[in-house]
Amino acid sequence: MSMSPYDWAQEFAIEQLRYEAIMKNATLHQCIYLFVEGESEEQAIPILLENAGLDLQKLGIVVANYNGIGNLSHVLRLMKRTLSHDRPIIATYDNDIEGAAFTSSVYKLGLDLDLVSFFPIPSEPIVCYADGHKGGAFEEAFTLYDFINTSLTDFISEGELSSVRSKLIETFDSSKPWDAQIARFLHAKGHAGFSSRKTNRAVALADSCSIIPETFTQLASAILKIRDRNLITHPDDVSLPKIPGLTI
């Protein structure tokens, strides 16, 4: 009995749904892990990457928070013992004193790093630390104007924002770590709780920054390059044995 055009269309639609479901599952199994340092980055970096044009779900990017640079070596060691041992990993880290100490010693830890890429945030030095290291942390990847505006919003009324911002900029040294300076400034004005709002501030920065910082456009490019080298394939896309008269 021949199939009607309706039956063909229905069969085709079902096959398309089946294919999409299989590929969705394959995308998860063939994921790329993007490790970020803390909760702030876990919530903010996906926003920035999506705004930079990446579809993280379609690309199979799994964002995971390793909860501080001190845990990163343990997380990498454990990953190599799981079923995800063959998946690429991009490990981001704050380019601060602790981050610099980790990256200078990571290759001495005896870890299998063949599929691991390290990415500093910010990607270029912005501030100088007490020990002379030049780098930065998440907030220093943004423009100083965006950082100051976002930092003051929760504490200063809109009517006072312009004058308070001007006073802060007069004494602000952009070559020194930013968070500590603005925390001191707000504390002197009787405002507490700056540090406790770190995650909210990071999300606000990601949502409202005037331009996407170059650090995150570079991270987006790095993700795409790694995905291009590790394309998502259908589970049935395998090489068959060469059998004369059958496969050749």
Image: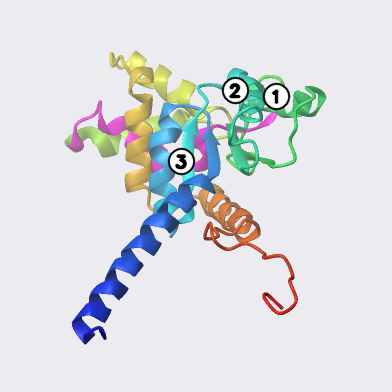
User: Mark 3 highlights which residue?
Assistant: 144
Q: Give left or right: position of 168 versus 13.
A: right
Q: Position of residue 4 (x, y in %)?
A: 21, 85
As for residue 139 lying within the magenta part, the answer is yes
User: Mark 1 highlights which residue?
Assistant: 102
Placement of the C terminus among the 4 image quadrants: bottom right
Q: Is 241 located above or below residue 165 in the figure?
A: below
Q: Amino acid at mark 1?
A: Phe
Q: Are marks 3 and 2 in contact (CB under 8 Å)?
A: no
User: Mark 2 highlights which residue?
Assistant: 69
Label 1, label 3: how far apart the Cα atoms are: 27 Å
Label 1, label 2: how far apart the Cα atoms are: 7 Å
Q: Is 236 located above or below residue 37 in the figure?
A: below
In this view, the residue in front, 48 or 27, is: 27
Q: Position of residue 122 (x, y in %)?
A: 58, 40
| Part of the protein shown in magenta | 133-158
Label 3, label 2: how far apart the Cα atoms are: 25 Å
Q: Position of residue 63 (x, y in %)?
A: 47, 39
